[in-house]
Amino acid sequence: MAKRIRPGRCYRWDTPAYSRVSNNPADSFITGIPGSKITRFDMGNVSGTFDSTLAIAVKDDIIIRHNSIEAARIVIQKKIEKAVGAANYHFKINIYPHHIIRENTMATGAGADRVQDGMRKSYGKPIGRAARVYKGQPVFTVYFNHTDDRFNRVKGALRAASKKLPGNFFFVEKRSVAA
C-alpha cells in the first residue's frame, strides 16, 4: 500500500519557512531535501505574443504542496493543448516550492514507546516541498489570443485545475485593446 500524505491542516503557515541550504553542511538548517515534482514551469509557445491573459489567484494565504501543483499543471497542459493548439498559448507557473515540509515520524507497533522520545527535540524529517502563496497572488497564468471559444476553454481548464489545489481561487483577466 502506498504511503499517504498528511492533510494540509498538519502544516501551519505561522511556522518559519525552512529552506536554508548552504555549501557548508554545518550551516545548513536542512539536509536531504527531496526534489520538486514540478517538471516544467513554461509550456506552449514561450516566444509568442498574445493579447490576453487569464490567471487564477488565491483568496487567502495558503501552502500548496509540490505534488498538487504538478497535478494541476498536467490537467491544464492537456486540456489547453487539445483545445487551443500547441502554438496558440503560453502557460506559466508563477510559484516555486521553496518551503520544506517536515514530519515527526512516530514509531508504531509493540515496544515503540520504549524506543521513541515522542515530541522531545522534534525538528522533523524532510518529506516534501511546498509553495507559500499569498492572498491575491496568481498561481497559473495562460497567455493567448482572445476569441470567445478560446477564453471559455482556457477558463474551463483553469477551473478543472483549481479542483486539484487546496483553497479557494478567483480568475484574473487582462485584455489588451488592439489599435
Image (cartoon, rainbow, N blue to C red):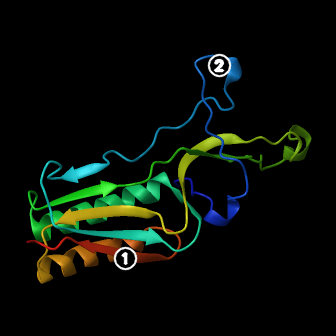
In the picture, residue 67 is in which quadrant?
bottom left
- The disc at residue 133 is none
Where's residue 107, x and y in %? 77, 46
Percent of width and height locating residue 178: 10, 71
Return the residue nearer the eye: 35 or 15.
15
Q: Position of residue 63 (x, y in %)?
A: 57, 59
- Mark 2 neighbour density, 10 Å: few (under 14) some (14–19) many (20 or more): few
Q: Is residue 90 above or below residue 126?
A: below
Q: Is residue 31 above or below residue 154?
A: above
Please tell me whether residue 175 is drawn above or below residue 131 in the rendered image: below
Q: Is residue 41 above or below residue 87?
A: above
Q: Report the amino acid beneath label 2.
A: Pro
Which residue has dot 1 on it? 171
Q: Is any atom of residue 7 visible in this view?
A: no
Badge number at residue 25: 2
Write the residue at 67% across / 45% down. 102
Report x, y in % for residue 13.
68, 59
Relative to 118, 87 lies left or right: left
Residue 128: tell me if it is visible: yes
**The residue tagged with tag 2: helix, strand or loop?**
helix
The one nearer the camera, 5 or 23, is 23
